[in-house]
Image (cartoon, rainbow, N blue to C red):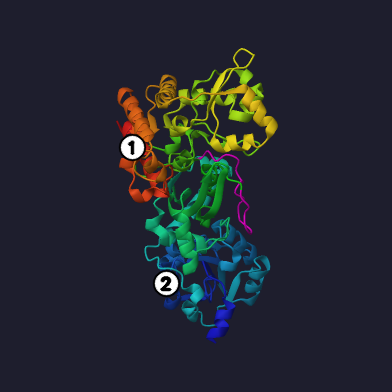
Amino acid sequence: MAHALSASIPNQVKLVVWDLDETLWNGTLSEEGISSVEAHLQMVRDLVDRGIMCSICSKNDFEDAKAALVDLDIWDYFVFPHIAWSPKGQAIKAMIAAMGLRDENVLFLDDNHLNLEEAQFFNPNVMVFDANQDILPLMDLPTLAGKDDKSHSRLKQYKVMEEKQVEQAETGLSNIDFLRQSEIRVKVITDVEDQMDRVYEILNRTNQLNYTKKRANTPAEKAQLQTLLNTAGVHAGLIEVQDRYGDYGVVGFFCVSAKYSGNVVHHLAFSCRTLNMGVEQWVWQFLNKPDFKTVGGVANPIDAHENVDWIQDVKDFDAPETARQQQHLCLVGGCDLLQVSFYCGTDRDEFVNKPDDNGMLVRFDDVGFFLNQRDPVLNRLFTQKNFIGYGSDDMVALDKSLASSDLILLSMYFSFANDLLFQYRGKEPGSEFLGSVPPRRFQQLMRDQKTAMRFAKSMQHRPYDIHDRLDLTHRCFQVADVLRRADAPIFIIGTTVRHGPQAERNPKPRIAFNDMCRKFCAETHNAHFIDIDTLLTPAEFTDSDHYSRTGYFKIADFVNSHTMMKIAA
């Protein structure tokens, strides 16, 4: 008997839909009256305590049925009830869609076999059970074990969904207009180590909005995830959501690798509780819309909305309006800023290492990017385009960003340390420029003999000593200072002098660079030096120029905390 029962309810149950007459209670409400079945009422309470939702699909008068359920003190345990003199199959289908569930996770209890067959006709994967039988043994099935939720957090979240859908129907607003007035706020939680149980739950329990379908069930899978989270350049976050209707809790998880060629998606999964709110599309947008292949079917394409502008990114739900996306950021530097930018906000201009059309590295942490003339003639030069990579349009965009941003973050150690600094003087006026060629790009260029000859004829190597290079980098900081608004802080990231093989081999240039940066910040209004050696622990250095995920988060937290202090003041 137990085996047969288990076979009829094979899938994890997330929703139980109850008929009322001769199922939840004995008798027919509209005829001879009813008598309550306390064991069934307790079953509803126990299901909700397990985080399994209960709904109603009954052919009755709504107000009469509600009054009876209120008298039984059980009405508030149900969500999305359908009580009307209408067919049940399509009603259940609409209910499942409204709750963002899949029919295979729904169990329908009814004493009429025609209603059960109709439910499965419109919802082919729904599980059904004839309520003429004893339904109490269902509570012993592993598929109805649920998860302890005596605080009824899931019930509250579905009540919020229900309230929203009722209000939207009453207002007649379009979905987007309704979302705009919903005051949706998102908090990105980057300290995921303290909430790994929730991470595992999201990865293992979500299907409709799990875009990679990667799980973390087994010890091996969990160990693999932990290794991934400890890898340099990997970023992860939990997504917590609230709006003016209520608190949805932690509903999503992402894990990506940040590379100069783009972000690689390892995990992207969300609970269906926020389906159709645009949360998953906002997170994809927050991650700079990485290109990846969705695995399996999903309820909502990741690119369903071109621009999600109705969600506010906040640092603290209870704080005043300090949304990170209200701060427009200008980030200039090497690959370390690709890591930091994950935690600094969504509204940002990134002048950070990237590949050009030929796949060769373009670096923006270059003195020429700040100091060269902004002349359109540079865009036509073979030398500028192929040997340096950025053009005058990029430099003009930098100037505009420096002038308009609320915060400027610079990581310029490469501009000082790279000695492959060249000068070009063309025949056309305005064609002179200074530029650092990344070592890897230089090696690629030299493989082609014609390109190497052209490089040798047009580019003059300038062997600047350490003092000259310090002066050039200092002038870059001065350009940023002149162009920025007075109330826009500048943050300058230093370099380690203590950790990693590069620093250990030759710490003197690093010491000189840090000293110059400190001096500039000390003498410049609203400028802040980020001392890496003081801020990070030794374990957070993967080498002299790269840090662990927690290290990058600390840098961003330093920036965010100083910015929030300024806003509060």
* Coordinates of residue 72 in the picture (x, y in percent): 41, 69
What residue type is disc 1 on? Asp
Please, which residue is most extreme toward the top here? 429
Which dot, 2 or 1, sits closer to the camera? 1
Q: Which image quadrant: the C terminus?
A: top left
* Coordinates of residue 69 in the picture (x, y in percent): 45, 67
Q: Out of 34 and 196, give the one closest to the viewer.
A: 196
Residue 508 placement: quadrant: top left
**Magenta stretch prevailing secondary structure:** loop
What residue type is disc 2 on? Asp
**Taking 559 as reference, is 290 left or right?**
right
Q: Residue at left 46%, top 70%? A: 146
* Coordinates of residue 127 in the picture (x, y in percent): 59, 72
Identify the residue under disc 2: 46
The question of residue 157 being in magenta is answered with no
| Magenta span | 292-310
| Callouts 2 and 1 close, C-beta under 8 Å | no
**Taking 549 as reference, is 132 left or right?**
right
Q: Residue at left 42%, top 19%? A: 482
Q: Residue at left 65%, top 22%? A: 381
Please, which residue is most extreme toward the right here? 450
Label 2: element kind? helix
Are there few (<14), some (14-19), or many (20+) residues within 10 Å of tag 2?
A: some
Identify the residue under disc 1: 531
Label 1: element kind? loop
How far is disc 2 from disc 1 in space, using C-alphas? 55 Å
Q: Out of 523 and 7, give the one closest to the viewer.
A: 523
* Coordinates of residue 476 in the picture (x, y in percent): 44, 24
**For marks 2 and 1 on the same chain, the one whose residue lies earlier in the sequence:** 2
